Image (tube, rainbow, N blue to C red):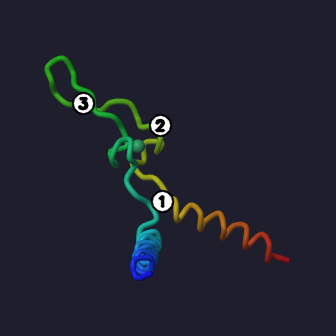
Amino acid sequence: MTFALLAITLLIGVTLCYVAVCAASPFGNCRKCSGMGHALKTNRRGQLKRGKDCRRCHATGKRIRIGRWLYNRWARIYRAGTAD
Ligand SMILES: [Zn+2]
């Protein structure tokens, strides 16, 4: 019983923190290019060069957080439903 209560409290806490993060910064760094917006290539001399643009984030280096994405969807549906 105590363990279940603890687990639930922890889960709620983590969820609240995630919601706060989504509200504070709705965009996180792209996981594929880690915020660079493009891949890194090395040329024949071993120097780092800018590679192809990241296709996952369209070279912005940012991705929208799942929580914010869900909120945006919900907000759009809510507005569409309440508009008259
Ligand atoms: Zn990317």
Residue 20 seen:
no
Amino acid type at image mark 2? Arg
Residue 29 seen:
yes
Image coordinates for residue 11, horizontal then vertical, percent: 44, 73
Please tell me how many numbered marks the rendered image carries: 3
Image coordinates for residue 35, horizontal then vertical, percent: 34, 49
Residue linked to disc 2: 55
Image coordinates for residue 43, horizontal then vertical, percent: 21, 21
Q: Which residue is located at x 46 percent, y 72 percent?
A: 15
Toward the top, the furthest residue is 44
Place residue 25 in its image quadrant.
Answer: bottom left
Q: Nearer the viewer, residue 15 or 33?
A: 15
Q: Residues within 10 Å of mark 3 (few under 14, many from 20)?
A: few
Label whose residue precedes the other's in the sequence (2 or 3): 3
The tag on residue 80 is none
Place residue 13 in its image quadrant.
Answer: bottom left
The tag on residue 65 is 1
Residue linked to disc 3: 49
Q: Nearer the viewer, residue 13 or 72?
A: 13
Amino acid type at image mark 3? Lys
Label whose residue precedes the other's in the sequence (1 or 2): 2
| Element on which disc 1 rests | loop
Amino acid type at image mark 1? Arg
Q: Where 70 sits versus 9, above or below?
A: above
Label whose residue precedes the other's in the sequence (1 or 3): 3
- Marks 1 and 3 sit apart, C-alpha to C-alpha, by 29 Å
In this rendering, which labeled residue sits more in front, label 1 or label 2?
1
